[in-house]
Image: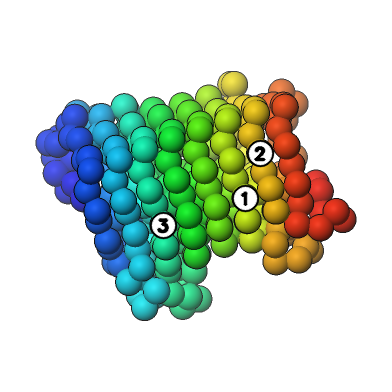
Amino acid sequence: AGSARQALGCGAYITLANLRVQSGRQEGIITTEKGADNPVGSHWRVVNNELTATTAATNPDAKGAGVAGSGLGNYWVGNYIHDVYDLPDGLTDEENHGFYVDGPGSYEIAYNWVKDIHNGNGINIYGTTGSPSDIDLHHNIMDGIHKHGLNIADGSTENLNFYNNLIYNVYISCVRFNTNTLTGNGVKIYNNTFYNCGTNGGGGYNGIVVNTWNPISDGLVDIRNNIFEPYVSSINYIG
């Protein structure tokens, strides 16, 4: 919703609230991605909606998220995002997520219930429109994630804060790093509970916290006061 208008500089300070939206096509359900290209189209509030992508189970090119985008002033709060699919086709597999931050801006993502993301991450941070930064993800429940819980990936930079979340029943890893661009304040992961991580049974790509790219420089990742519980006791940290 709204990407073309945002690119023209329209559609600032839009509020989408108390809606039920089902989308099975490309670009997910609600998309604000052009906010990074034209800041005057930013400051979207997505509040208290029910968002699903059940019909994407038959669509091989479904990708995006319950809420995806970039730009300043994103406020994605109190939503119920569930049953998000992407039919595997060997091209866009597992690219339909709970949330997707795809570029620079500022984001408060809080008090959401994300359940049964069958073909994606709980939150995907991947810089398709620039370098994601300034994210506060807090007080969310994520249950039944078929890929990673938190995916901190290509282009991620600084002020990425994850705190007071409950993330459980995760198929691959509860926290995954796949970035060599962290800088400044980097990533802070505080006071979360991660439970039943790596339910597909382990292996070199699974665990509680994994790093699948180059070593991360000292001081750019701060993980404190969390509870981690793997699917089996032999899985813990890989990277």
* Within-10-Å neighbours for mark 2: few <14, some 14–19, many 20+: some
Taking the image as shown, residue 226 lies to the left or right of residue 138, namely: right
Q: Amino acid at mark 3?
A: His
What residue sits right under mark 3 in the picture? 82
Q: Are the two marked residues, 2 and 3, in contact with CB atoms closer than 8 angstroms?
A: no
100 versus 110 height, above or below: below
Give the residue displayed 57% in from the left and 36% down from the top. Answer: 165
Across and down, in percent, residue 81 comes to 39, 52
Q: How many marks?
A: 3
Q: Earlier in the sequence, mark 2 or mark 3?
A: 3
Give the residue displayed 64% in from the left and 61% down from the top. Answer: 171
Secondary structure at numbered mark 2: strand
Q: Earlier in the sequence, mark 2 or mark 1?
A: 1
Give the residue displayed 42% in from the left and 62% down from the top. Answer: 83
Give the residue displayed 48% in from the left and 28% down from the top. Answer: 136
What residue sits right under mark 1 in the picture? 168
